[in-house]
Amino acid sequence: MSAVNNTNFNLFLLTGIPGQEDVHLWISVSFCLVYVISIVGNSVILFIIKTDPSLHEPMYIFLSMLAITDLGILISTMPTILGIYLFNSREISFEACFAQLFFIHSLQLNESSMLLLMAFDRFVAICNPLRYTSILTVQTIDNMGLISVLRSLTVIFPLPFLLKKFRYCQANVLSHSYCLHQEVMKMACSDISVNSIYGLFITFLTVGLDSLLIFLSYVMILNTALSITSNAECLRAMNTCVSHLCAVLLFYTPMIGLSVIHRFGKGSSPLLQTVLSYISLLLPPLINPIVYSMKSRHLRAGISRALVKCRVSS
């Protein structure tokens, strides 16, 4: 991108946790641990699913897509977050900021899409098990994944260009350790109504629609499970959804809370906004591999087989 026109400066200043500047180095240790555990966990999930033929099923293919998305979010946020806490590097150029927010928002929307696809997988498996393999073929899964990625990229693509047209003449200090659309547009001294409306439209079209469809899918799943005469079979069917439900709650709860605070909570605590933003982006990649590894018997078995192979080869 070329330099932004009609501006009094050409960079933004990122912010760490408010009031905790003296302990940034110690906070960086926590973030380093989160990144290392998250990257290793998601990489292990991908490796096990790829190398174990018994896991080449729709549920685990969707899980691998989720892991790739989580890794993308980690890579997109890591440079600026660790830069602030390790090196006190707060400056970020317009171009880098716009690129970062593009990747963060598109990956978040793609994660929402992956959670919807995983809900559809559980819906078909429980409500129509006899047609499970015929509905969720490899070609169908690939097409669904491709459509999800294209949707996320398409709806976020205009944002950097809309932001680029603004004239920035206010204080250039962002309240997070990375760039977000709702934060950057507030720095403009131009009319931001188009961006605000478009951002709200994206939220309802993607996250809002996805969460509604996930809710409806679980209403039908619950209705089908309760109609099973055997309590053991009913519990077994619902148990396959526990991991996905945890992933849904981890993703949507802080994300919706942060969106509400940004738009309507002008008097809210900056510390609350900062903590929620970190939870929204970093908690799902950290917890998802742990939850799925604990709850999926087949995945645990795959990890055990991989460990045995490593021991034998060593």
Image (cartoon, helix red, strand yellow):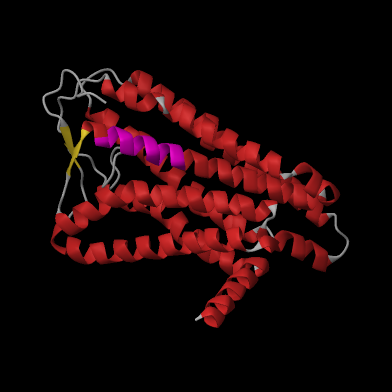
- Compared to residue 17, the image places residue 214 above or below, namely above
Q: Nearer the viewer, residue 249 or 73?
A: 73
Q: In the image, which residues are magenta?
A: 96-107
In the drawing, does residue 8 fall left or right of residue 199? left
Q: Give percent across and percent down for residue 205.
A: 54, 29
- 271 is higher (above) or lower (below) than 39: above
Q: What x and y, as percent, mark residue 245?
A: 60, 55
Q: Main secondary structure of the magenta part?
A: helix
Quarter of the image holding residue 232? bottom right
Residue 117, placed above or below residue 19: above
Is residue 106 magenta-colored? yes
Q: Residue at x 55, y 64 (%)?
A: 291
Residue at the spot 70% in from the left edge and 48% down from the top edge:
121
- Residue at figure coordinates x 60%, y 60% from the top left: 49
Q: Position of residue 164 (x, y in %)?
A: 27, 23
Whether residue 135 can be seen here: yes
Q: Residue at x 53, y 81 (%)?
A: 311
The answer to which quarter of the image holds residue 303 is: bottom right
Q: Position of residue 288 (x, y in %)?
A: 51, 59
Quarter of the image that includes the N terminus: top left
Q: Would residue 310 be found to the left or right of residue 164 on screen? A: right
Of residue 119 and residue 303, the one placed in the foreground of this image is 303
Task: Residue lying at the far left in this picture: please name it.
Answer: 8
